[in-house]
Amino acid sequence: MSLDPLLKVYDEASRCNRCGYCQPTCPTYSLTYLERDVARGRNNLVRAVCENRHPMDRAVKSAIFGCLMCDACVTNCHPEVRTDQIIAAARAAYYAQFGRPAIQQVIFERLLPDPGVLGRLLGLARLGKNTRLSSLVRVLRILGWYGRSLATAEALLPRIPRHFLREMPETQAELAPGGDGLRVAYFVGCAINFAMPQVGLATLKLLRSAGCAVTMLDNVCCGLPPYAYGDLESARALARRNLDAIAEIEADVVLTECASCTSFLREYPHLFAEDPDARARAEGVARRVKDATQFLATMELPFQGTGRLRVTYHAPCHLSHYLKERSAPRQVLTSLPGVEFVELPEADWCCGGAGSYNLTHPDTSEQILDRKMANVRKTGAQVLATACPSCLMQLAYGVRRHKLNVYVKHVVELVAERISLPEQA
């Protein structure tokens, strides 16, 4: 068995003093109260495997793959033990011993590096999903025959957009005028491009209104999905592609409205810790990366009042825990005319989406989501805002599931709805 990935994080895992401060903030522990479902238990298991006191078996697999990697434990940890990095290494070690599922290899090594192929496949999926065939499949439970995860995926994304962001004429119209202000390299997240192009258009609209010179990067996936599954080499391959794409653009800021992409782009230096040249490039990029909400908090926009809205905010884990950014999104929302902002109880508590966690652990994910929806109901909000595509899908699914009269929107969408733009020449 190759323990190389684990041995590299052994010292980090050993910094955990098992104090238990991670317990009250861990969503999975709150459901089971089992030691294997909290950071200190997971870190202790990793140490035991490294010290040959415990085999890499099903118990270890359940512990390391049951983690949301939400980083709430790190936020509440005095020595700030990076449990997320330990979990990623543990997953890499597990697959090194037992082999990686073929579907992961296809996604991480063939689809994510080639957005064109991925787009064509999603186009075919759109043909069935947006017609009666999708409902028929659900009724006949054909999806159920292929596993719960496919049925869950069907519920999470009711429709696939007719056009993806990169192929929309409106996208080019927003990019065409350009500006002589801040030079922005716009990093297009996979979910924004393929599932939520309206969010991308809102971002471009806001950047144009601020006079920015915007260039859409020819980027690929940020690399977070393979990294989260322990495929560190696939993550590095995608990261190198993105570093090359960013190097081709003279930009003051690298911006994205996906909190997950923002945080992982900032993590590139850690990804290349053993490659000094790549690490130096990654550090140069990381210093320029900003989340759209952080950027919006510094912009002066021509707001206009359009009725009153009661708005609450779910804080994505990658924004609140990884980036430690809690004020910018709230500052943006409270600055909007006509918006009554109400704080969401446990706003920074994970919604259960966590990338594809809602597909791999649907029962646990839904229990975590139920807690989030109960808190949303308490606010009486008309709009639930957030800043992460994965959260948007999960929260919208929760609203439908709980039959709440609440709209789920990205922060940038709300802002774009409340600005007054001059007519284009």
Image: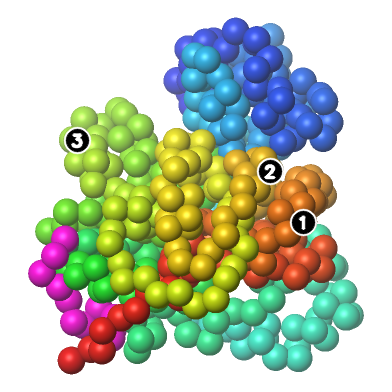
User: Quick check: 153 left or right of 230?
Assistant: right
Q: Is mark 3 on a helix, strand or loop?
A: helix
Q: Mark 2 points at which residue?
A: 345
**Label 2 packing within 10 angstroms: few (<14), some (14-19), many (20+):** some
Q: Report x, y in % for residue 202.
A: 40, 73
- Residue 328 part of the magenta-drawn span: no
Q: Is mark 1 on a helix, strand or loop?
A: helix
From the image, give the main secondary structure of the stretch colored magenta: loop
How many marks overall?
3
Which label's residue is closer to the chain start, 2 or 3?
Answer: 3
Q: Which amino acid does label 1 sit on?
A: Arg
Q: Name the residue under label 1.
A: 377
Compared with residue 165, is residue 109 higher up or lower down, i.e. above or below? above
**Label 1 packing within 10 angstroms: few (<14), some (14-19), many (20+):** some
Q: How far apart are marks 1 and 2 (CA)?
A: 10 Å
Q: Quadrant of residue 112?
A: bottom left
Q: Report x, y in % for residue 227.
A: 48, 43
Compared with residue 268, is residue 177 higher up or lower down, i.e. above or below? below
Q: Which amino acid does label 2 sit on?
A: Pro
- Residue 176 part of the magenta-drawn span: yes
**Which residues fall within the magenta stretch?**
172-182
| Residue occupying image coordinates x 21% and y 30% | 276
Q: How far apart are marks 1 and 3 (CA)?
A: 47 Å
Q: Name the residue under label 3.
A: 280
